[in-house]
Image (spheres, helix red, strand yellow):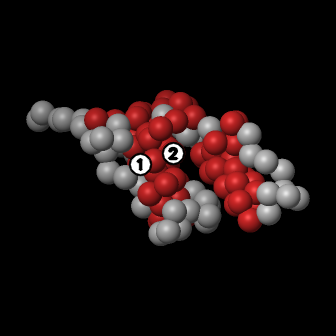
Amino acid sequence: MKTFTAPKNILLVIIAIATLLFTGCEEGAFPTVTPEQQSLSVITNYAQNPDTAKAPDVDTYHTLDIQSVTPSNIQDVNLLIARIGKDKVDTKEELKEVIAKREKALALIMAYASDSTHAPAPTLETYR
């Protein structure tokens, strides 16, 4: 029987193999992929291949307990993920940090836009 591993599911296969190696499983048992692992795989795959991979949806982020991603900002978040690449979002913690940094920058920009007299001015770093 010939088996084919498509690029879009290779991360899931690697996770499953690593889990087997590190946890040890009874013969014939195969660990299941958790919803969090699946969601992170979708996001990292998109970050690595934004032109060909399926874009993450709001539920994908919510599964990782990132509730700030909404239908109104999903496209902007996915553009950010595609721009910064896989290496900066390949763990849940890194992904949360990227999203939090985005939210903080947007809050600073919006505060300055509404009150440039009292709010601190955004810097070049704010826009990166």
Three-letter amino acid code at disc 1? Val
Residue drawn where x is 47% and y is 64% of the image? 58
Image coords of residue 30 (percent x, y): 40, 45
> Residue 53, image x and y in percent?
31, 45
The residue drawn where x is 52% and y is 36% is 84
Q: Which residue is drawn at 37% across and 52% down?
A: 55
Asked which quadrant contains residue 82, the reply is top left
State left or right for residue 84 relative to residue 114.
Answer: left
Residue 94 x %, y %: 63, 41
**Disc on res. 80:** 2
Q: What element carries label 2?
A: helix
Relative to residue 105, is residue 74 depicted above or below?
below
The C terminus: image quadrant: top right
Observer-nearest of 96 and 107: 107
Q: What element carries label 1?
A: helix
- Quarter of the image where one finds residue 29: top left
Dot 2 crowding, Cα within 10 Å, few <14, some 14–19, many 20+: some
Furthest residue toward front: 117
Q: In which quarter of the image is the N terminus?
A: top left
Residue carrying label 1: 42
Which amino acid is tagged 2? Leu
Q: Where is residue 116 in the image (x, y as percent from the top left)?
A: 80, 57
Which of the marked residues, 2 or 1, is nearer the chain's N terminus? 1
* Residue 8 seen in this snapshot: no
In this view, the mark in front (2 or 1): 2
